[in-house]
Image (cartoon, rainbow, N blue to C red):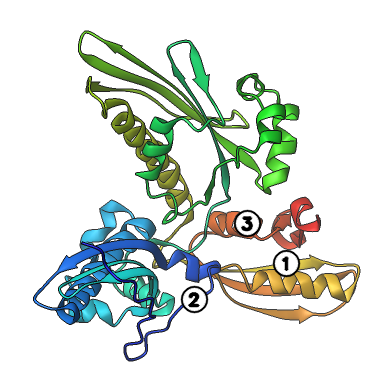
Amino acid sequence: MRLPALGLVLMLGAWMPAVAEDGLETLFTIRDVAVDETARDALRAREQALRVAENKAWDKVIDKLTRVADRDKLPPLSYEERRRYVSGIEVLKEQASSNRYVASLNVRFEPELMIRLFTENGVGHVLSLGQPLLVLHGHTRGIFTHFLSEDATLLAARERVDWVNRLRPYIWPAATEAERENFSWRQIVSGNQAHLAPHLRAYGVPRGLVIQSSWVERDGMGSLAFRAYESDGTEELLADVIEKPAGPMAEEDAIAEMYDAIIGVEEKAWRQSQLVDAGATGSIEADVAAERIETLLEIERRLDRVTLVTGYRRLTLALPLSRIALDFAGREEQLIVAMKQVGLEFVGEGESRRLTLSEAGRE
C-alpha cells in the first residue's frame, strides 16, 4: 500500500515544531522515533502513533540520563502525566492513508521539568554530553579485513543500532576516496598516535573508538570475537565472543549486538562519572586568569554552558587576576570534568586555585 506524504509539523497546545540541537536540548531530545500504527481512520492512527512515540521517547530519555539502580525511585506516571514533560514534537517524515500512519519523529522533553522530577525523587542524572568519538572498526572475514569499506553486512548491522540518542556523539569516517588512500587499518592497530592524530583533527574529535572483530563459521555455528578500546590505549573497554547458529543473518545479528554492547560500556562509564547526585551541591572561589577583559568575558560565557554550574558572581574585577565564586550541583570532580568539556580548567588547589582557559579552549 502506497502512503501519501503529508509533511506537517504537529502543534498541540504548547508543543513546539523544532529545537536547537545543542546543550541540554540535545540531552533531553530523543530523535528518530519510528512509529507505524493502524486504526479505524487516519486521525485515530495518528493519535495512537503519537502516544506510542511519546512512550518510546520517555523510556529512552530515562535510560539515557539515569542509572538502572535509581529508576525505581521515579513515581509511576500515566500517559497524560508524562505529556506534561513533553515540550515539542518535530515530524521528520510521515506518510498516511485512510487508516494508517507511519512517521519518524523527534520528541523533546522540557529540561527544567525533567531535572526537577529527578531531583525531587532523589534520582541521580547526567547533565553533560561526553566528548565525541570517531568510530574506527576493522572487521575480519576470511583473509580480508574490512575498514572504510561498503561491506553490506557491516552497513546493515550499523543501521540497526541507535547511534544518535546517546550521551556521546559517535562519528563514522566518511570513507572518501582520499581517506581510503591515506588511512589504513594497519596505522590504527600500530598504536602510533602520530598516524591517527591528523584524522582525529580532521573530524574535530579528541580520540577514536577502536573496534577489532573477526567472524568465523564452523560446524553450524558462527563466532564473532571482538575487542574495543579508545585510541589513546589507556584502557580496554570490552573484549568478548558472541556466538550464533550459522545462517544468512547470523553475522549481521552478532555485529549489531557487539555495537550495542560496546556503546553500553562507553555510556555507563560516562554516566557514572557525570552523574549528578540529586542531593549534593557545592561552591568554589577561584582566581580567574585573564590578561584581557575579552578573555574574562569568554571564560564567563563558557561558564554559562556548564550545566552543573547553578550560578556565579564576580568578587573582584582586576586584570590579570579577578576573583569569582560559583555554585554547582553534584560533586567537585564532576564539575572539573564538565568544565573540560567547554575548554575550562582549574590550575592549583585551595586558595591559590585559578580558573583559566585550557589548552584546548585556546585553540
Q: Tell me if residue 39 can be seen.
A: yes
Q: Tell me how far mark 2 sits from mark 1, CA to CA.
A: 35 Å
Q: Which residue is mark 3?
A: 341
Mark 2: few/some/many CA within 10 Å (<14, 14-19, 20+): some
Q: Quadrant of the N terminus?
A: bottom left
Please give the name of the residue rendered at 65% of the width and 46% of the height, measured from the top-left corner: 205
The image quarter in which residue 198 lies: top right
Q: Quadrant of the C terminus?
A: bottom right
Q: Which residue is mark 2?
A: 19
Please report whichever mark, 1 or 3, sits nearer to the chain's N-terminal start: 1
Question: Residue 260: image x %, image y %?
Answer: 36, 40
Front position in the image: 264 or 202? 202
Please report whichever mark, 3 or 2, sits nearer to the chain's N-terminal start: 2
Q: Is there CB contact under 8 Å for labels 1 and 3?
A: no
Indicate which disc residue 61 carries: none
Front position in the image: 100 or 308? 100
Q: Is residue 272 above or below residue 251?
A: below
Secondary structure category for the residue under label 3? helix
Mark 1: few/some/many CA within 10 Å (<14, 14-19, 20+): many
Which amino acid does the dot numbered 1 rest on? Answer: Ala
Farthest residue toward the bottom?
Answer: 13
Secondary structure category for the residue under label 1? strand
Question: Residue 331: image x %, image y %?
Answer: 50, 59
Q: Tell me if residue 308 can be seen.
A: no
Question: Residue 72: image x %, image y %?
Answer: 21, 60
Mark 3: few/some/many CA within 10 Å (<14, 14-19, 20+): many
Q: Is 321 placed left or right of 69 in the picture?
A: right
